[in-house]
Structures are given as C-alpha cells and as structure tokens.
Image: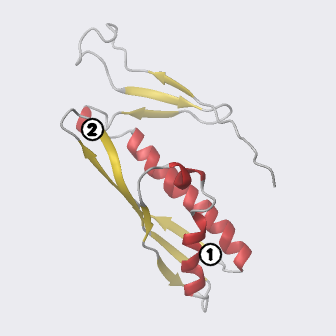
Amino acid sequence: MPTVTHDYTARIAWTGNRGEGTRSYRGYDRTWSIVTPGKAEIACSNDPLLGGDPARPNPEDLLLASLSSCHMLWYLHLAAKAGIVVHEYRDDPLGVGETGPRGEGRFLSAVLRPEIRVDPGADLAAADALHGEVHHYCFIARSVNFPVSVEARYIEG
C-alpha cells in the first residue's frame, strides 16, 4: 500500500494582550485559543509554573492528552478486530518533564495507565498484548521522541 500524506490545520490565536502587548514581561497573559475548522474553540494557557491559568489546558496537558487519546482509539480498534469486547476505557496518564538551567523544557517519558473494562472471561493476555501493537499505528506515539510505556489494569464485567 502506498504512503498517504495527511494535512492537519488549526489556528492558534493569542488572547492575552492586555492593551500594551509584550511591552513588559509581566504585562500580558499567557492565553490563547485553538480553533480547528468546524470544531469547538479551546481556550488555553501556559503551564501554571510559568504564570499560566491553572483552569485552562496548557501545551503539556494537550500533548499528554493527545498521546493518551491516540493510544486509546487505536487500542479500541485493535480490540474490536481481535474480538475483545471493551466496555469502558479510562486513562490517567503521567508525563514526566524536566526544565533545564536556561528554562528549556522537555518530556522525559510518559506512562499511560488505562483501566479497561472487558467482557467476563476475556483473554487478558491478548488484551494486554494489543498495547504493543498500538505503537505501530498511533500518529502521536510514533512522533514523540521520548519513551512511552503502558501500565494497564483490566476489570472483567
């Protein structure tokens, strides 16, 4: 099968100008909106450690949520193909980051920690093995440059 390219677009618009622009470092808000054509606007802010609004998602939140969501969607797809019936999927992922001496940041790793409710009697070893297959498909997991591990828990019922 030939390789197919995909285009993704979004508009990022800074909303934090208090009237003086960036005249002073503390004179503006670290807020913006994400607008994707035909979809709801997302109001965002910087990480609270860097002066952002803790009530709004920040880039690090969004990256971790994207990674977890992509993994979940591919997991559900592969589970359906494998005949493993999933009734519920929740994840509480953990991203570990670091900030260097100049303020530069990066993710060191991420751990996805899904709790997955499957049919009673499901083959849990087969269900667990699907996580390793997801990495072959997920755009986000295939694009990040830090290790991603999975610590899944299964509930039958």
Question: Residue 5 location, x and y as percent?
Answer: 72, 41
Q: Earlier in the sequence, mark 2 or mark 1?
A: 2
Can you name the residue that lies furthest to the bottom here? 121
Can you identify the residue that label 1 sits on?
A: 86
Which amino acid lies under the numbered mark 1 shown in the image of this protein? Answer: Val
Query: The N terminus appears in which quarter of the rendering?
Result: bottom right
Question: Residue 95 location, x and y as percent?
Answer: 36, 55
Q: Which mark is residue 142?
A: none
Residue 3 in view, yes or no: yes
Above or below 136: residue 155: below
Query: The C terminus appears in which quarter of the rendering?
Result: bottom right
Q: Foreground residue, 90 or 151?
A: 151
- Residue at 50% across / 53% down in the picture? 67
Q: Foreground residue, 77 or 148?
A: 148
Which amino acid lies under the numbered mark 2 shown in the image of this protein? Answer: Pro
Give yes or no for contact between labels 2 and 1 (Cβ–Cβ under 8 Å). Answer: no
Question: Residue 39 location, x and y as percent?
Answer: 64, 36
- Residue at 49% across / 66% down in the picture? 90
Left or right: where 65 falls relative to 136: left
- Residue at 69% across / 36% down in the picture? 7
For disc 1, the neighbor class at 10 Å (few under 14, some 14 to 19, many from 20) is: many
User: Label 2 vs label 1: CA separation?
Assistant: 36 Å
For residue 133, what is the image quadrant?
bottom right
For residue 69, what is the image quadrant?
bottom right
Q: Which mark is residue 48?
A: 2
